[in-house]
Amino acid sequence: MTTPSPVSGLGDSKTKLAILAMAIGSFGIGTGEFAIMGLLRNLAGDLQISIQDAGHVISAYALGVVVGAPLFAILFARTPRKPLMIWLMGLFVIGNIGSALAPDYWSLLGLRFLSGLPHGAYFGIAALVAASMVDTGYRARAVGRVMLGLTIATLIGMPLATWLGQYMGWRPTFAGVGVVGALAVLMIFRFVPDLKLAEGASPLTELSALRRPQVWLTLGICAVGCGGMFSVFTYVDPLLIDVAHIPQVWVPLVLALFGVGMTLGNILGAAMADKALMPTIGGMLAFNVISLAVIPWTAQLWLTAALSVFLVGFTVAIGTALQTRLMDVAADGQTLAATLMHAAFNTANALGALLGGMAIGAGWGPASTGPVGAVLALGGLVLFVISALLDKRQSRWQPLDVVPQPAE
């Protein structure tokens, strides 16, 4: 196996094809993760369960991500990255085809858990592969292009799946996601280069990342601070229909605005992270607090409700910055740290969905998910301040152990 030499920028055709192949996998995973949020009513009606119980299907997937990300990173620490990505996407395909065929609620819960297991490990490994193929000054943008498949899933895949689900039921949605996953397997096999593992790669080496406080702080920022987006978006269907009184036929179009926000956030956030990593993280957390806190007022009108959905999508700009930060602070345990990023992101998914559902269950209504999300974003901002202060303290006594950043 050979390791490709990093190229300046992102212009090399082989690099573009490899990143495209991995982005198709991201698109499939993103569609599978988010599409169900626009189909909670359909799923609940078909399986004869409550909206809150239907939300547990989302939590089951998120739990699978949380369990699978560290498990696979450690168990397969010595497995070359290309075949590991192919295997992970294959497992994702099986989980989604199985979800389409699930006979009842409990089997669907188990299959969504199975579908979530490869999620974090795939994204983490794909991010490392993409970053290794470009110069240091372009790492965040390379990672961002892989993650662009996830954001395009919210722009195209999720509204299309929601529309399909409204007319044909939720099962064809999962079957379609499985087909996209199979395409990703073929693309990765054809275009992603074989990469040598780092010298000394082992489960113990990966576990060394867990000894670093900055790794835990960065994961905490993600797990808490990103929960606000999911607090709102998990229950965006009742928010738009019951509060803003938007006709159900227009809901997929408003969900597309969420995808537009995510796509712009991903592109701009990656560019900002390459220029100023920590200010990007702190600034986006502050932005999250404000944009989520005003939702009880903005959700009252069609136009402002749609704007809020767009702004909540834009908050994903923080994702690439946090992924790059983890690469910097994890030293020799980058694979585990990179996969744990997505476990943390889905912890945010589960936490936001849980707290948002509790607020609705308490009778506060779907608009209450905004303030709940603002509190979570504020918690992430507090952890960010602690991390920044620790950086400053360490720089006084010794250099922070990070990946070197050569001047451009």
Image (cartoon, rainbow, N blue to C red):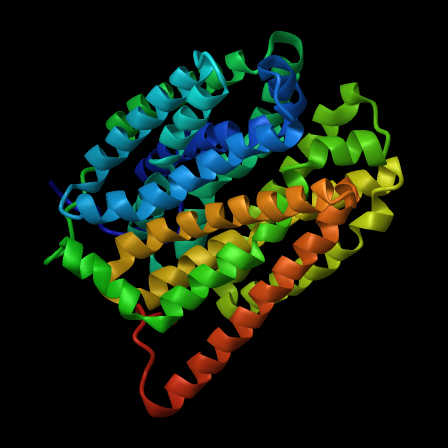
Image check: 237 left or right of 200? right
- Give the percent coordinates (x, y) of residue 386: 50, 76
Q: Residue at x 45, y 34 (%)?
A: 61
Residue closest to the eye, 67 or 327: 67
Residue at image coords 18%, 38%: 194
**Image x and y of residue 401, in percent:** 30, 75
Q: Can you say whether 391 is above or below 311 in the image? A: below
**Nearer to us in this view, 97 or 254:** 97
Q: Position of residue 112 (x, y in %)?
A: 43, 28
In the foreground, 192 or 124: 124
Q: Specify whether residue 313 is in view.
A: no
Where in the figure is residue 104, as x and y percent of width and height? 48, 15
The relative height of residue 322 versus residue 396 in the rendered view (above or below) is above
Q: How many marks?
A: 0
Q: Is 114 situated left or right of 386 in this image?
A: left
Can residue 129 be seen from the camera position used here? yes
**Residue, far front:** 362
* Quarter of the image where the C terminus is located: bottom left
